[in-house]
């Protein structure tokens, strides 16, 4: 038996154990099918009387994602430069990179729980949660972009006697800006999806309505909310990917 | 004008690029550095404005210390040293004029420059530098829409915008069509003759080097192995600089 075969066997055994431990059972899934069909049947037709609150929730979700992404895009800028190996001295670079990796391991929803506890219910803790997660993820993307730039213009600007900030502005920024904008739009797309569930933990937006109607077992209303969510995400994805295609 | 003493450069992790080089270049000289690739030509040029950090030895330019000086003083010395690169190293998505204006960065107020504002006097001077390389009409074009030869002329204008007393050019024609070599070297020669600017150019084409330089410095394996006028570069000297097969 080769080493690869042994590794394959160990991997399969580990996966089998996880299937047993999580109770993953195809039969149970099949047995549940009628209930899912029942759920869908009871969800149609969607209850359009809740269209107005659903749309209001969608707008709130869009606002949370937009404001959170914009603030994060700005806050991440200095962090991105500080955690890029080729423009920052090691004494700053290593702590900055470590802090980012630490903060980035926490998801938006977890941040939302923390901020709801800190500032109370509503869209504001949602905005803060989006800012917290997106800042670290954008800073990481920024710094990797900065590390991949052409060193030629940086050398040329340095050679003119420019200060460090001038070198960043003229040697680095023009090379990375289009990519940065593209990443920001990409984060905006994922943040809109992430923000749809922020309402589940009391952090505002359309998720609040979805959770409320599901708890009230009002499936036609819940399905209206779901359809509005899907439409919103699709529209934003479409617009954003069109914009991104023009940037790079 | 340029005074290099005992310059030793070890590139990380442990490649010795230069072994204690001594060279004094007088004002107005037109020096061509020749040698095989890897002989230390680029490292030598980049040590003069400390784009490469010398391991030991001293460099002085126009009477000012380059080595062992604080960052602010280093920037003051750097702005007197124009540099031209093999790959032009322009800011690609930016206008030609802005590229030339970057040559003024060490002269203009820092904060306005960061938002792209330059004093009218400096803009006028940048345009003047552009017309000296024959590109006055290109000011508003994006740098990456220009041909290679044109980009290198913009790079020369950027160096001129520094009002330098020295210009270093690292293989300025190596990425260009051979037909353009004469035009770029001609512009550099004219600058040297008309303004008395000290010029140090590395060049791997021996013919061009001998035609252009008033003084030839040959590098081999991190050491200077020849220093003299072009007329003294005999086939035997060339063989020593380039190795036996030349």
Image (cartoon, coloured by chain):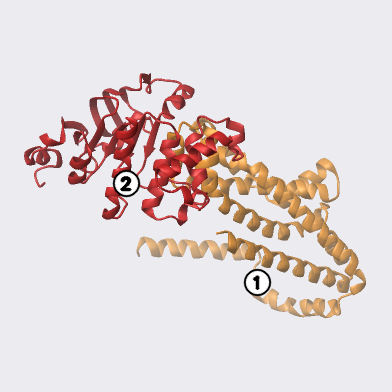
Chain colours: A orange, B red
* Residues marked 2 and 1, same chain: no
Residue at image position (60%, 38%) is B117
Crowdedness near tag 1: few (<14), some (14–19) or many (≥20) residues, C-alpha within 10 Å: few
Residue at the image position 44 percent from the left and 30 percent from the top: B79
Which of B185 and A160 lies nearest the eye of the viewer?
B185
Instruction: Return the residue at label 2.
Output: B184
Mark 2 neighbour class, 10 Å CA radius: few under 14, some 14 to 19, many 20 or more:
some
- Give the label on residue A25, or none: 1
In this view, A40 is above or below A112: below
Please indicate whether residue A45 sits to the left or right of residue B126 in the image.
right
Percent position of residue A48, x then y: 89, 74
At which x and y percent is residue B8?
27, 27
Q: Residue at x 71, y 68 (%)?
A: A234
Compared with A64, B169 (above or below) is above
Q: Residue furthest left?
A: B236
Q: Subunit of mark 1?
A: A
Disc 2 or disc 1, which is closer to the eye? 2
Chain bearing mark 2: B
Residue sitting at the far right: A49
């Amino acid at each position: 038996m080769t080493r690869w075969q042994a590794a394959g066997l160990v991997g399969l055994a580990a996966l089998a154990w996880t299937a047993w431990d999580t109770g993953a059972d195809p039969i149970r899934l099949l047995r549940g099918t009628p209930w899912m069909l029942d759920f869908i049947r009871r969800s149609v037709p969607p209850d359009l009387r809740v269209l107005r609150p659903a749309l209001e929730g969608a707008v709130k979700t869009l606002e949370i994602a937009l404001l959170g992404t914009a603030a994060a895009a700005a806050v991440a800028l200095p962090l991105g430069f500080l955690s890029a190996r080729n423009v920052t001295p090691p004494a700053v670079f290593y702590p900055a990179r470590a802090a980012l990796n630490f903060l980035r391991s926490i998801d938006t929803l977890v941040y939302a729980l923390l901020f709801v506890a800190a500032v109370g219910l509503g869209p504001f803790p949602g905005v803060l949660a989006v800012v917290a997660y997106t800042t670290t993820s954008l800073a990481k993307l920024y710094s990797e972009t900065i590390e991949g730039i052409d060193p030629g213009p940086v050398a040329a600007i340095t050679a003119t006697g420019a200060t460090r900030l001038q070198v960043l502005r003229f040697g680095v920024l023009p090379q990375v800006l289009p990519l940065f904008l593209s990443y920001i739009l990409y984060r905006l797309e994922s943040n809109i999806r992430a923000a749809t569930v922020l309402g589940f933990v009391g952090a505002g937006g359309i998720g609040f309505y979805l959770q409320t109607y599901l708890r009230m077992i009002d499936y036609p209303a819940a399905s209206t909310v779901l359809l509005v969510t899907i439409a919103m995400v699709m529209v934003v994805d479409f617009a954003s990917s069109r914009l991104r295609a023009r940037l790079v | 004008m340029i005074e290099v003493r005992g310059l030793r450069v070890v590139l990380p992790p442990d490649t010795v690029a230069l072994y204690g080089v001594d060279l004094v270049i007088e004002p107005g000289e037109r020096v061509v550095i020749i040698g095989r690739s890897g002989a230390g030509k680029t490292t030598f040029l980049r040590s003069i404005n400390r784009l490469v950090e010398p391991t030991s030895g001293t460099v002085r330019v126009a009477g000012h210390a380059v080595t062992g000086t604080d960052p602010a003083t280093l920037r003051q010395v750097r702005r007197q040293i124009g540099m031209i690169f093999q790959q032009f190293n322009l800011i690609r998505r930016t206008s030609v004029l802005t590229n030339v204006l970057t040559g003024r960065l060490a002269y203009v107020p820092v904060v306005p420059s960061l938002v792209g504002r330059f004093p009218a006097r400096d803009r006028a001077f940048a345009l003047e530098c552009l017309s000296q390389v024959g590109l006055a009409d290109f000011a508003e074009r994006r740098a990456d829409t220009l041909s290679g030869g044109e980009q290198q002329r913009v790079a020369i204008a950027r160096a001129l915008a520094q009002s330098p007393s020295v210009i270093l050019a690292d293989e300025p024609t190596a990425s260009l069509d051979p037909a353009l070599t004469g035009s770029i070297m001609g512009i550099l020669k004219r600058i040297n003759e008309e303004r008395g600017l000290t010029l140090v150019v590395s060049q791997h084409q021996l013919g061009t080097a001998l035609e252009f330089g008033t003084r030839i410095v040959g590098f081999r394996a991190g050491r200077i192995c020849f220093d003299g006028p072009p007329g003294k570069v005999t086939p035997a000297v060339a063989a020593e600089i380039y190795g036996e097969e030349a």
